[in-house]
Image (cartoon, coloured by chain):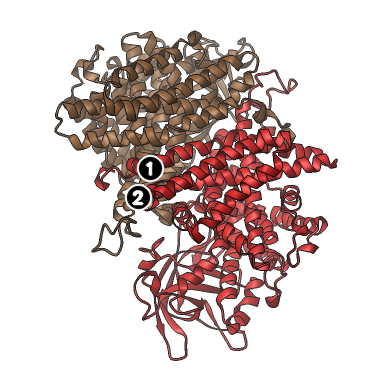
Chain colours: A red, B brown
Amino acid sequence: MTTYAAPVRDMQFVLHDVLEISKQDLPGHGDLDRAFTEAVLDAAGKLAAEVLAPLNPVGDRQGCRLENGVVRTPDGFRAGFEQMREGGWTALDCDPEYGGQGMPYVIGLAAGEMFSAANMAFTMYQGLTHGAYSAIHAHGSDDQKATYLPKMVSCEWTGTMNLTEPHAGTDLGLLRTKAEPQEDGSYRITGQKIFISAGDHDMAENVVHLVLAKAPGGGEGTRGISLFIVPKFLVNADGTLGERNAVSVGNIEEKMGIHGNATCVMNYDGAQGWLLGELHKGMRAMFTMMNEARIGVGLQGYSVAEAAYQNAAAYARDRLQGRAVTGDENPSGPADPLIVHPDIRRNLMDQKSFLEGARALAFWGAHLIDRAKLADDRQAHDLVSLLTPVIKGFLTDKGFDSAVQAQQVFGGHGYIEEQGMSQFVRDARITMIYEGANGVQALDLVGRKLAAEGGKPIMAFFEMVKSEIKVQEADELLQARFCEPLKAASKDLQSAAMFFMEQGMKNPNAALAGSYDFMHLFGHVALGLMWLRMAAAARKALGEGTQDATFHETKLATGRYYMARQLPATAMHLARIRSGAEPVMALDAARF
Amino acid sequence: MTTYAAPVRDMQFVLHDVLEISKQDLPGHGDLDRAFTEAVLDAAGKLAAEVLAPLNPVGDRQGCRLENGVVRTPDGFRAGFEQMREGGWTALDCDPEYGGQGMPYVIGLAAGEMFSAANMAFTMYQGLTHGAYSAIHAHGSDDQKATYLPKMVSCEWTGTMNLTEPHAGTDLGLLRTKAEPQEDGSYRITGQKIFISAGDHDMAENVVHLVLAKAPGGGEGTRGISLFIVPKFLVNADGTLGERNAVSVGNIEEKMGIHGNATCVMNYDGAQGWLLGELHKGMRAMFTMMNEARIGVGLQGYSVAEAAYQNAAAYARDRLQGRAVTGDENPSGPADPLIVHPDIRRNLMDQKSFLEGARALAFWGAHLIDRAKLADDRQAHDLVSLLTPVIKGFLTDKGFDSAVQAQQVFGGHGYIEEQGMSQFVRDARITMIYEGANGVQALDLVGRKLAAEGGKPIMAFFEMVKSEIKVQEADELLQARFCEPLKAASKDLQSAAMFFMEQGMKNPNAALAGSYDFMHLFGHVALGLMWLRMAAAARKALGEGTQDATFHETKLATGRYYMARQLPATAMHLARIRSGAEPVMALDAARF
């Protein structure tokens, strides 16, 4: 049986010591002092630890069932969802005009980390709703907003995203779902969508599906795609629910993990839908919320790993097995705890140094989104666009690896389902796949983001790294342990970018063959930068005579580990990248 | 639905072009010409592909059930096991004195790769029996051998290994199972064992448990441990089965994978057992078969990955999604196959170059065991002792990663259980854990094997790498693409070994903190050496005007990929090792 404790102390450090959130000249940020965010995070953490976490193994064991066309969620999910709704947790960073609390996205993300860590499958019902909310908020008519948003903010109605079809995953240009215009301005939607997370369930009155489909006259490929609102129950003019729409659940997929979330085959049989945004501009409407959705998945990746890590650390402290090589540390017991063994520590430090860096990166990404939105900061927008595939791809790959490492601490016990560690691994696995498989993230990074705005965002990132190193290297400890390794890692990243630029035009495959390594290289540099920032903040707190010296010293030691033991991966990724396309593309397809 | 095709062509290459098996001056090896081994491998491959592989998803879905104290295996397992038995596949490398076919271990291993790839959970019933057979063969009295071995060679009776108890996994010194001597020379065994693979089932008449227990007078810790034979049914003097022994299945564990194999809690309630080997020397008896058992698990690790890879490659060729950046490759279709995309190739080449290297390494390890046994070759024995933790730890870690990569090729479809890719990942996961978790393998490598015989085996390995490079670097292509990268990687390994030697005495934690990285560093160098050998063999074949040039050219291209894209990992592992114990051990246990 696993447990979860909300890492509020660490979140407070990131929000206040690193991001200095309440000192930012942004609307509403002045109120976010330490006491306020601590109160919010404590309350969210309590819900996560006490309500959501106990439901996590239940969801895994029971899964969802399709009964007479209706999806039944696992025992306790409905009551848990009600508690989440009543606490206002679904409305945290939503627009007050529609019942939201108007907090910055970074606060919503912090709460989201705890909810996902405690119960990822459960939290997805709300997460998908938030995504659909954002799309309608950005692209809906006043009428659509008035009709749907208040109910979605409160999660009385939930939302879904319908993109994939059996033959069309990454390649949405192949979509076949049709939208036929009706005389009343609505459309009839016909087709089959698959892999629809939270596609149906019994925890809300209505489900608002956002569906990509092809309306006449849009041309071939992705150009012909539009986005439609297709509610499960039609909504009357007075806001009450009317008839059942012609959309049904064909099947619930049996998956490797996230069993508590219903992944549905959705059949649209001439269902009534309404255009969201402009006709034939559905892809653009989808993309405006991609940053947020992808950062949300990156968040899931490390959140589940955080929960796994907590359990591994506890087990390593408790489980007695073997003796320390340097002399017994528990002489009165039959053996020493696992945590005395250097290789167990190596394992735990790999996890811990990744997780804290990942949190800092995700929060920074969320803060950049806030900055872009609230201050109309173009640089912040471009930077977070660049970072988004890194946050999604790197944090989910490493989050999965981290969960696997946590499971490994348990030895054979980790393989037994009852222990709960297997669920973390199985759940984390999907984050590398959905919302754009990580290979697609790498392609987005190298094929699109790197060259965006003439390369300005990546140059700005390098400049940022350089100037932060310059500021911090006056501190001798930071200079040797943090600035120097980051300088070397950043140089590797620049060399890789340079290699792509040189090759790009004449040999596009060379850049694409190195794209995955570039994403990881970038991820390490980004986490290195986070660790420099965190180390500097810890040094500052220690210099100011903090009451909590142990926390800050632990932070420094954890950061030193990342710089010494993880950052050297950049050279390997650069070497792989530099080997170019030839070794990758040498074989005929038939030779595999 | 997954498929499996036996890689007979590649096995033939390793056996004949690389190991030159029939040219070895070893008993029975002269008969192993190409035609003979091809006939054996073809037949094994047919059983694997046609009988075992179709049962793989059945085993995963149904699992094993405990009914009235008896374990029921999944539908079809019994008939499949009968076919394996009837074909003589359980007796391949067993002693002819007890009904075996007397072939070298390397041939048994080759067949084992196919069986494990096709159905790992199923094959474990036979694999565990082989382990128990080896223990009785090495340590049993003539009577014990005559009683048990013929039935175990034929798998009419199967075997198990009982080590773990709830509080004693890696640390066997904590065992509590007791053995009380009886007047008739037998013992009464009392205690509980857990995680007993193939602990019971309905496919054989009897199950022969080998049980570690403490008999009086042996002292504390592992010194007091003896090994006992405890049959499920007692065996009468005439070899017929007698009474049921006091051993029962308490439970079948629900695991992440290998559902088709019954992982049992075994309760011994004064069960009658007989000492195997010397009293209080049970650990030594266990260790004599460790090399073989651990190489067997390394084999499982890459075998499952091989099956996963085959399915991923087929999917990448078939699935149409997106267009090649260099121009449409399937202009008449709606999209190009996945395999045109450089990042999909990078993924597949990572797998392919690992798998073929892993096969060569496992086969070489098996061949060294044959050499040690048949020619009483001390050097071969010491070398395979050194390589064993690398084969187990590296091939299972990388095998799991490889299966995860194969699953990734399928995108969302890979996460759906029906597709079968999830099973490969879930099954492969256990190989990193059992038969000594991989952290324990790393500890064995650095704490024991490295310093064994005064360091002679590792020095011999370095000498071997050096001299093979010297021979091959006359060939310009081999020199640039294979010898140079291997030279650099081997230098990294030597530097790491040197670092450990320097640190070893004064700071044992420094070596242990780097042990896991050392295991991976060693694994890369070992695979690099395999690729140099394979490349040289391919060059030779091409030079001699082989009829199968495509095969050998593909081999060279695959090897080039490994050298260019995988071997650079050695520098990262060396950097991690060199950072020493400080970053790893800095924190108090309470800070995790």
Vertical order, B159 against A408 (above or below) = above
- On residue B47, which mark appears? none
- What is the three-letter code of the residue carrying label 1? Gly
Image position of B299 (left or right of A34): left
The residue closer to the viewer here, A558 or A528, is A528
CA separation in Å, label 2 and label 1: 9 Å
The residue closer to the viewer here, B188 or B32, is B32
Asked which secondary structure carries label 2, the reply is loop
Pinpoint residue B108: horizontal percent, then vertical percent: 30, 25
Quarter of the rendering occupied by the C terminus of chain A: top left
Which residue position holds label 1?
A580
Q: Residue at x 46, y 53 (%)?
A: A446
Pinpoint residue B489: horizontal percent, then vertical percent: 44, 26
**Can residue A349 be seen at all in this image of the molecule?**
no
The residue sitting at the bottom extreme is: A183
Which residue position holds label 2?
A507
